[in-house]
Image: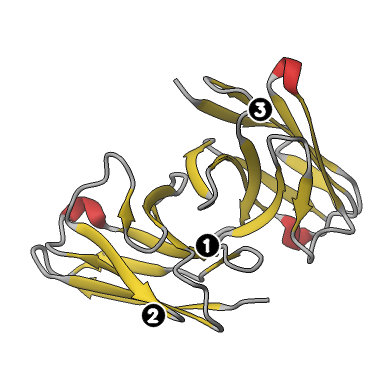
Amino acid sequence: QVQLKESGPVLVQASETLSLTCTVSGFSLTNYGVIWVRQPPGKGLEWMGIIWRNGNTDYNSALKSRLSINRDTSKSQVFLKMNSLQTDDTAIYYCTRVYGYNYLFDYWGQGVMVTVSS
Amino acid sequence: DIQMTQSPSLLSASVGDRVTLNCKASQNINKNLNWYQQKLGEAPKLLIYYTNNLQTGIPSRFSGSGSGTDYTLTISSLQPEDVATYFCFQYNSGLTFGSGTKLEIK
């Protein structure tokens, strides 16, 4: 069945770089895109960036200067790197599969809570 | 960027009530709108796509409607398990989530 699972450090120091991995199963990254979405504690959802099935990427303009997303299709993994972290980057980070032209985020990972410490 | 405004931010209703949640876009989004449900401590779940299409496995008491800038999610008969925060999401121009409506049982 389709599964996504985020992994990475739960505590990061301010000004450092966050590296997260989304490991997927049950589908191929060459057939579906993956989007990263984050949610600060008690707040709403913010899309961060997408890696499409062809490997192209799109980023939220608010994060574009700090963010990169790439993948290893042979390992079924998608990678997020974001630099210059600040305390307001503290959030739950989710990866989710993107299906179709209507941007269906149909399967989500459980999320990983990342705390940025000053 | 398109802004998405959801109202109300908090809604209390009784079991069995018909409930309507609103989402207003800052410009026409051509029905390119999805709805997500997020229960406490869980990842969001897709409910409705392209304004009024029910995702597989979602109960039929959920429905969506709208056009232009104004969209609604309706629960025909509120159930206890519907307690959650609901987010709209537009993909017509860029991508934007709404700020959410928290739905509680009265």
Helix, strand or loop at mark 1:
loop
Using the rendered image, report if marks 1 and 2 lie on a common chain. Answer: no
Where A31 sits versus B55, above or below? above
Percent position of residue B39, x then y: 37, 51
Percent position of residue A46, x then y: 62, 60
Cα–Cα span, label 3 and label 2: 36 Å
Earlier sequence position, callout 3 versus callout 1: 3
Instruction: Return the residue at label 3.
Output: A29
Give the farthest residue toward the top.
Answer: A74
Colour convention:
secondary structure
Q: Which kind of residue does numbered mark 2 sit on?
A: Ser
Q: Which kind of residue does numbered mark 1 sit on?
A: Gly
Instruction: Return the residue at label 1.
Output: A42
In the picture, the quarter occupied by the C terminus of chain B is bottom left
Percent position of residue B89, x then y: 50, 63
Helix, strand or loop at mark 2:
strand
B106 left or right of B98? left
Protein chain holding label 3: A
